[in-house]
Image (cartoon, rainbow, N blue to C red):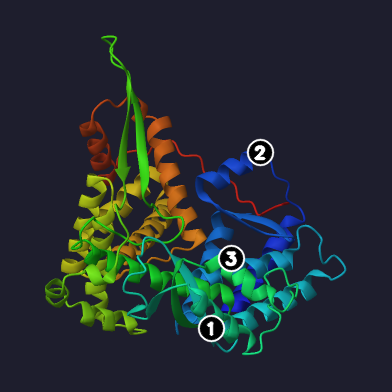
Amino acid sequence: MNLDQSLASLRQLVAHLHAKSQSTEHSSADFRRVIMGGTYFTRAPYGGLALIDDELKSYRNCLHDISEIATKKGLISRSAVESHVQLAILKALDINGIQASLDFDKRLSGALVELKKSLLVTPQRWELHLQVLGLSAKGLPYKFGACEFYLADEARIKHIHEKINGPGGGAVQMAGGVDTQPDWGLAQLKRVMIGGTWCTIHVDAIDKEAALVLAERHLRLTIDVINFYAEVTVGRARIFLPGDAGPSRRRGLRIPSDGSAPDITQTQVGPLEEFSVVDIPEAMAQLLELVRVSSWLEKSKPSELEDRILSALQWAGRAGIADRREEAFLLYTIAMESLLLGGRSNTEITEKFALRGAHLLSSDLDARKNVYKDLKELYGIRSAIVHSGSLEVTDDELSRIAAVARGALVSVLHLPPFLLMTAESEFEEWFKDQLLGASQIPYEKPQSWTSLPS
């Protein structure tokens, strides 16, 4: 299937949603149905759309086909494709009447033309500067893989400003679209960057959103691998991105029952000091092939074996900085699984996961088949995350696994015969009986619905 055929399928779906929305009213119960098994997305100012059942299945099929074609060259992320497709749908439906002067057919055609252009635009080279925390200025600048880490001092910031504006300076276009005074751009860069540690990375992408997603994905991989090597330094140092867990103090108040004086405990959690690349012992760097791993990270497409080893390094790097022992144990286990099993999923585990979920969440054969297929796909995403280092999950995929988890928990907590169970053996016996053809639990099949005003 080519892109035009995929867009034709999307056209049919949107036309169906438009026709249905003209005669459909929604109750508060519809919201519960979306929470239990649907998806909802919104874009200002065009409104929001909620999908379940056949419409949701058609949407996901269209999104899958378009994503497979658009992301083949790795120039746009799957999440960016998802965003473009959702925007096209909402522009065409125009639930809030933003383009009321245009009839539906014109809105739909225009939205699909814009979507195609957004997916096929010629990619360009982007240079991104992303802040990194927990990294010492000692040993900088330092290039590891495709990432160059540097200290944002006066000289570096001036160089960046000249690259943006030319040697003679000039106005900087800010995010709000307002041209500033000639010297304000340099001052703004200094306010944002001065004294911090940053990373420069270059990517090929078709738009600024895709460029940021691709750059952050590669930087996270690089940071996780570096943190694996950081484990051999003193102080259990780590580097991280803003918003990730950093150093902090954990406090607690202790009040004894014997009347003695209470006290406050204070424990330092997280890294004790900043990480410096020069602190990695040379012998350890040679033993763990630091230079060779760096060369793998510099490649746009590492070999299958290189990607497999990088994935194991990535999970081990995360394990090394995990504050909870149980979490660290799990992550090290995933690292071993990734290294030893690679991309080969455990068929028995996948099958058990999908079959049990299908019986827990569905009542009839056709519904179970659909849930079974969906769960196998979701477990495949889990396997991709574990085994190949692929970290990108779209909003729809996250909502799908969340809906599955919610639905399963509601079933176990709320429905018979689970309400009467007191032992795990009863739960296991129920699954065994279901697979042997026992009767199903009560299951409310939701009604289909489409759009909501934002």
Instruction: Say whether residue 270 is left or right of residue 428.
Output: right
Badge 2 marks a residue whose secondary structure is helix
Residues packed near mark 2 inside 10 Å, few (<14), some (14 to 19) or many (20 plus): few
Mark 3 is on which residue type?
Arg
Seen in the picture, residue 355 relative to 239 is either above or below; the reply is above
Q: Are marks 1 and 2 in contact (CB under 8 Å)?
A: no
- What is the x, y in percent for residue 55? 59, 60
The residue tagged 3 is 191
Q: Which disc is residue 159 wearing?
A: 1
How far separated are the C-alphas under marks 1 and 3? 15 Å
The residue tagged 2 is 28
- What is the x, y in percent for residue 24? 73, 50
The mark nearer the N terminus, 1 or 2, is 2
Residues packed near mark 3 inside 10 Å, few (<14), some (14 to 19) or many (20 plus): few
The mark nearer the N terminus, 1 or 3, is 1
How far separated are the C-alphas under marks 1 and 2? 57 Å
Q: Which disc is residue 32 wearing?
A: none
